[in-house]
């Protein structure tokens, strides 16, 4: 087995995760079985309780792990299915070490960062799960961060143990462009590599984020000062139109060839036709449609990452550019604000927590239902669809979710007994993959084309089955049910082009080459829908 470590230098948000994901795609194309994971140096045990303002989306895996959004890139770019073990944080490492210490596992020894913490980190590299040829591990944070040191030290030790020829270090760095001098600067990268070498790690490949192409002289300079061959200085220019260009761009720079040669893997290069087709459709789409995403973290680039990506994937399938308009839910609470919805071909209400912006989302659902605008509700978006229908069609003005009004006389979305006495907020929701049986003759069944599906969840509140009959009589139909618990997982509105709400998060299972069926049909419906 071979190991690749990806570190980052100079600044954060360099797109290390995307680089790791794109490399994974290139290696998979060569027929290698890969897995990508992330080690995060922060002390939180998982990102589940972290504010999206700071951290972007929480990405959920099949096993219910709440992880960093980079794991979303890994799963979207490759075929690997990740688990809890693939997102290790310092918080988890220290939690385990302290538990072991309390249990007496260290037999009274002094417990230290080296070797106890580093051993715990290395243990996560030794057992990546079923058949893997290459394990790619991204180290979060930036070289020079104090909390990252134990991870780097563990990598250094690990390469000594498994043999340096089985390990590759890739350092992703930034080359700032100084306008006045008209020059790309290599100094910050030199210093970052020097810091790595201080702890005994010599990067094999430098991936340079840059706004401008690298000429030979800067490649030579980086080579000389950072101690890597000129050919191992890789240019990674900002992508023009889409992140899905990245594998092709890195292949042009020979990244995958360098990697397989350095690790002595025989698999030859393969044509990247599928990726080329994806990029062609993204760059020169035949159609165009406009979709509004109504949320409360709308100003943030990353808060609804997987939702935006899934819409793009659906667009690829239809050869259609999906123009995404971010709509601030609170603005939809006024009449003027609602005007924004008239420019949309479809509306998505993504997941969310808490009271803020709820009325605006309900107004959006009402607008969609009354004007035959396609609507797709994800988790909270199902709750919104249900509350709106209960209030405006069933005539229950106080209908609500118990999340927003726990005294509501009509709690159409409610809290199940076992969730009522949850005190620990971390990891206590209904999390991870659950099976769902679909009802024949529904739009959902038509989209999936099969009777049983598995989707990922992350929520506390549920559709209240007591109202099922009344809803059904008026045209809100249950389209999917959990076979074990009987919980309602999908609802759709009859006699509407597409108004579907799902209790799960379909956005966690969509890829550019395999769009999620519901997103695909939703975008298909948007393409047929007229703006108002
Ligand atoms: N806040 C809602 C719940 O906890 C919805 C969660 C979500 O959209 N992910 O059930």
Image (cartoon, helix red, strand yellow):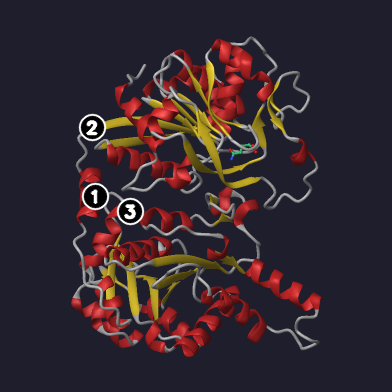
CB atoms at circles 1 and 2 under 8 Å apart? no
Specify whether residue 180 is in view: no
> According to the image, label 1 marks what residue?
279
**Badge 3: few (under 14), some or many (20 or more) residues near its Cα, within 10 Å?**
some
Above or below 38: residue 470: above
> According to the image, label 2 marks what residue?
287
**Badge 2: few (under 14), some or many (20 or more) residues near its Cα, within 10 Å?**
few
The CA distance from mark 1 to mark 2 is 15 Å
**Badge 1: few (under 14), some or many (20 or more) residues near its Cα, within 10 Å?**
many
The CA distance from mark 1 to mark 3 is 9 Å
> According to the image, label 3 marks what residue?
243
Which badge, 3 or 2, comes first in the chain's sequence?
A: 3
Position in image of residue 24 (x %, y %): 36, 65
Asked if residue 408 lies left or right of residue 340, the reply is right
Above or below 485: residue 222: below
Q: Quadrant of residue 184?
A: bottom left
* Picture quarter with the C terminus: top left
* Ligand 1 visible in quadrant: top right
Position in image of residue 94 (x %, y %): 69, 72
The CA distance from mark 3 to mark 2 is 20 Å
Q: Secondary structure at mark 3?
A: helix
* Picture quarter with the N terminus: bottom left
Residue visible at 25% across and 78% down? 266
Which badge, 1 or 2, comes first in the chain's sequence?
A: 1
């Amino acid at each position: 087995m071979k190991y690749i470590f990806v570190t980052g230098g100079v600044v954060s948000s360099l797109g290390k995760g995307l680089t790791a994901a794109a490399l994974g795609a290139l290696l998979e194309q060569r027929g290698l079985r890969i897995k990508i994971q992330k080690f995060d140096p922060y002390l939180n045990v998982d990102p589940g309780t972290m504010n999206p303002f700071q951290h972007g989306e929480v990405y959920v895996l099949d096993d219910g792990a709440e992880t960093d959004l980079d794991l979303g890139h890994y799963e979207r770019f490759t075929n690997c299915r990740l688990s809890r073990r693939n997102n290790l944080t310092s918080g988890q490492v220290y939690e385990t070490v302290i538990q072991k210490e309390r249990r007496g596992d260290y037999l009274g020894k002094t417990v230290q960062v080296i070797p106890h913490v580093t051993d715990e980190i290395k243990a996560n590299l030794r057992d990546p799960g079923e058949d893997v040829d290459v394990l790619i591990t991204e180290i979060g944070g930036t070289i020079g961060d104090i909390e990252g040191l134990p991870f780097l030290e563990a990598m250094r030790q690990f390469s000594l143990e498994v043999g340096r020829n089985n390990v590759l270090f890739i350092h992703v760095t930034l080359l700032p462009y100084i306008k006045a001098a008209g020059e790309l600067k290599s100094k910050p990268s030199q210093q970052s590599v020097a810091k790595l070498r201080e702890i005994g790690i010599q990067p094999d490949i430098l991936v340079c984020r840059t706004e401008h192409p690298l000429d030979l002289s800067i490649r030579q300079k980086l080579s000389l000062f950072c101690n890597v061959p000129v050919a191992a200085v890789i240019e990674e220019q900002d992508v023009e139109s889409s992140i899905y260009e990245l594998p092709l761009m890195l292949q042009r720079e020979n990244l995958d060839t360098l990697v397989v040669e350095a690790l002595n893997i025989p698999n030859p290069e393969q044509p990247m036709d599928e990726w080329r087709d994806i990029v062609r459709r993204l760059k020169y789409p035949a159609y165009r449609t406009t979709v509004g995403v109504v949320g409360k973290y709308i100003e943030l680039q990353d808060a609804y990452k997987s939702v935006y990506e899934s819409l793009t994937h659906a667009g690829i399938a239809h050869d259609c550019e999906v123009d995404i308009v971010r709509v601030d839910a609170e603005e939809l609470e006024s009449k003027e604000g609602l005007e924004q919805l008239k420019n949309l071909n479809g509306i998505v209400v993504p997941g969310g927590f808490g009271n803020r912006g709820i009325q605006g989302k309900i107004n959006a659902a009402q607008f969609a239902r009354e004007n035959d605008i396609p609507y797709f509700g994800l988790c909270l978006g199902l709750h919104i669809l249900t509350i709106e229908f209960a209030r405006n069609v069933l005539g229950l003005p106080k209908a609500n979710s118990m999340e927003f009004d726990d005294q509501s006389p009509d709690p159409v979305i409610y809290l199940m007994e076992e969730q009522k006495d949850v005190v620990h907020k971390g990891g206590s929701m209904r999390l991870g993959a659950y099976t769902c049986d679909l009802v024949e003759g529904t739009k959902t069944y038509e989209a999936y084309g099969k009777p049983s599906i598995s989707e990922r969840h992350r929520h506390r509140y549920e559709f209240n089955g007591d109202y099922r009959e009344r809803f059904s009589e008026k045209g809100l139909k249950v389209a999917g049910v959990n076979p074990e618990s009987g919980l309602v997982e999908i609802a759709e509105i009859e006699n509407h082009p597409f108004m579907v709400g799902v209790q799960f998060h379909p956005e966690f299972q969509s890829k550019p080459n395999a769009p999620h069926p519901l997103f695909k049909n939703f975008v298909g419906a948007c393409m047929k829908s007229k703006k108002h």
